[in-house]
Structure formats: C-alpha cells, structure tokens
Image (spheres, rainbow, N blue to C red):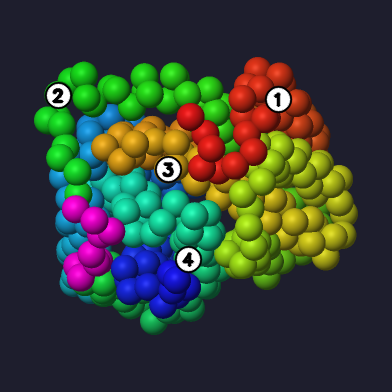
Amino acid sequence: MTAPLHRQPPFVLFWTSRVFGSLAFQMASVAFGWLIYDLTGSAYQLGLAGLVQFLPMVLLTFVVGAVADRFDRRRIVMISQWVQAGTIALLTLGAIQGWLGVNGLFAGLFLLGAARTFERPAMAALLPSLVTPAELPKAVALSSSAMQTATIVGPSLGGLLHALGAAVPLGLSALLFALGALAMAPIRLRGAPPVREPVTLRAVFSGLGFVRSKPVLLGAISLDMVAVLLGGITALLPIYARDILQTGPWGLGLLRTAPAVGALAMAFFIGRMNLDRHVGMKMFAAVIVFGLCTIVFAASETLWLSVGVLVVLGAADNVSVVIRQTLVQLATPDDMRGRVSALNSLFIGASNQLGEFESGMTAGLFGVVAAGVIGGIGTIGVALAWMRLFPALRHADRLDGVK
C-alpha cells in the first residue's frame, strides 16, 4: 500500500521547494514594487516592471520546454532557483550600499523572469515523475496549495519586513530561494529517466503540434486562458476598494487575499477527495461559477459580500486549475511534458497580463462596474461556446482516460 503523499519524501521535498520558491517570489515582488515606486514615483514604471518579467517568457517559451525534456528537470529547477537567489542577493547588496538604480532593478527583474521561465515548466513536468498517476490530482492540489499559501503570506510578510528596509525582505527572499534549491537536490524519481531526444528546431516546436492534435488539451488550456483574460479583475481591485466599497488599504488587502483563501481551502478539499469523475463538466461548471462570481462582485456595494464572493471565485478557479494541470500532465508523454508545460505557462502568463490590460481598457470605456459585469458575462459565454467547440473535453470523464 502506497504511503500518503505527506509521508513520501520525494513529494515532501518537492512541495517544500515550491513553498520556499513561491514565498520568496511574493516577498521579493513587494520589495521590488516599493523600490521602483520610491525611485521613480511613476505608476508607468510599475507596469513596465511586470512587462520586463513577462518578456523572457515570450522569448524563451519554446526553448525552455525543449530543454526541460532533454535535461534533468531537478537540476533545471535547482539552477533556476540558485540564479534567482544570486540575483536577489546582488540586488540586496545594491540596496544596502545605495548604488542600486532603476536600470539595475529592471536588469535584475529580466534575469529573474528568465530564470522563472526555465523553472516553471521543469517544475510542472517533474511532479508526475514523483507520484503515481492515481495520486497526481491530489499532488497537483497540494502543490497548488503551496502557491496559494505563498500568495497569502508572502505579500504581507514582505510588506511588514520592508519597514526595516528593502534589504530585509530581499535578503530573506534570496535565502528562501537557496533553501528551495537545497530541498530539490536529494529528490529521487520513480524509475529511471527516459532517454531524451536532441534539442532540434523540430523538437522545440513539437509541443505546439502535440497540443493541437489533442482536442481535450487544446480545449482545457485555451478555456482557462480566455476565461482569465475576460474575467480577470485583479487590476481593478484598488478602484473597487476605494470608489465602490468605500474602504481603505486594509479593505484592498482583504480583497486581494480572498481569492487565495478560497483557492487554498479548495486545494486541501481536493487533496482529500476523488476528483476523477465527470472532470470535463466539472471544469466547465467551475469556469461558469467563476464568471457568475465576477458579475456579483462587480455589482456588490458591500465589502463583506465582495470578500465572500471572491473566496468562492478563488475556489472555483482552483478546481479549473487542478483539472487542467492534471489533464495536461497525464495526457502528455513524459518526454513531451516540458514543452507542453512551457506552452501552458505561456498561455497562463499571457492571460494574466493581457487580462489586466483588457480590464483597464474596458473600465476606461464603460466604467469599472460595467467592466466587471461584461467580463463575467464574457467568461460564461466562452464556457458555453467551448462546450460546443470541444465536445471531447465536455465528455471527458476520468483524468487518466484522455487520449
């Protein structure tokens, strides 16, 4: 009988590494935001900082996927985390000595974005090598809980420590990245790693062709991307907090934390139950609930209703994320997982970045409440349309039954 996941050393080490890395990233992001705004006083520069970190993903996606399928994924994650630790340590030194400027910050952010672009697909593709196929949905849910925990704790801790100076959260972030790399080192895979094909131009782009040949994968990845693109309201939360809900920074903190709380609760719930029936319809239902919650939130004028709705929204989003990630991993051969995971990461990154842009433009044209309502309706419409466009996804019953 297989031991529970929390008693399996390879998974525990993997989870620990992910917790440390995610917490370090969230803490560093808060410190970088404060530093950039202190140095420039420009909201435009804050937006540019996000673009600088996203640009490496666009440039390197197909390369990093092929690399993850050719080389040891544990070493890729370790090297990526060491690079992030070293980069942040150097920026910490600059903050202490007073020579760190905006150009240096942006150069560091670009390097961090490149390292994370290598880390994400390797980390995602590594997980199925540590657990059995039957354990993968629960493993994905528990792995997702690491991200959500970091999203809740990291920004608050980074903000508190920033009162002691930017070097404090940055230094702790560098240390956590180093600890994450050390946790990854002793991990042992289930069985011997397969022989990898050489990195060729054809191999680099084969992940895209593989996803196109699998309607279930294409439907799941594109559904999640378009739903977040239309229904994402994160960029508008400061406006809702101040102008609609008439609250201050503490209220904005509640709004930002609420989806992560819901997602974390759902991740632990999924970790204790069997999600492997009618998974296609469950994913569509989760996206529709996400859209409905977006509409209710947009129309709400009460803080606690808004917070409660965002908790449900986060829980629904986590169901979609777990099903999508598990489908992607189980339906993809091990020697292709890096490339497919890299493509999946690009879609997620694009939806988050472009979703913020779409929300801002829609709010500017129609008002912030109308923007939320339009986004929620659009999300529901996409879910209904995808049910007709991708019947294979709609009829998907078991996570390990996708061909």
Residue that carries the numbered disc 1 in the rendered image: 387
Residue that carries the numbered disc 4 in the rendered image: 146
Residue 86 on image: x %, y %: 17, 63
Residue 236 on image: x %, y %: 66, 46
Q: Amino acid at mark 2?
A: Thr
Q: Is residue 249 above or below residue 199?
A: below
Q: Alpha carbon of mark 4 to alpha carbon of mark 3: how far?
A: 18 Å
Figure quadrant of residue 12:
bottom left
Figure quadrant of residue 332:
top left
Q: Amino acid at mark 4?
A: Ala
Q: Are marks 3 and 1 in contact (CB under 8 Å)?
A: no
Q: Alpha carbon of mark 3 to alpha carbon of mark 2: how far?
A: 23 Å
For the question of whether residue 241 can be seen, the reply is no
Judging depth in this view, the residue of 62 and 371 nearest the camera is: 62
Q: Residues within 10 Å of mark 2 (few under 14, many from 20)?
A: few
Judging depth in this view, the residue of 166 and 53 nearest the camera is: 53
Q: Is residue 364 left or right of residue 193?
A: right
- What secondary structure is the stretch in magenta mostly built from? loop
Q: Is residue 129 left or right of residue 86?
A: right
Q: Alpha carbon of mark 1 to alpha carbon of mark 2: how far?
A: 36 Å
For the question of whether residue 183 can be seen, the reply is yes
Residue range of the region highlighted in magenta in the rendering: 184-192
Q: Is residue 359 left or right of residue 31?
A: right
Q: Is residue 392 left or right of residue 42?
A: right
Q: Amino acid at mark 1?
A: Met
Point 28% across, 22% down: residue: 205
Residue that carries the numbered disc 3 in the rendered image: 329
Point 68% across, 56% down: residue: 315
Residue that carries the numbered disc 2 in the rendered image: 200
**Pointer 4 or 3: first along the chain:** 4
Q: Alpha carbon of mark 2 to alpha carbon of mark 4: how far?
A: 34 Å
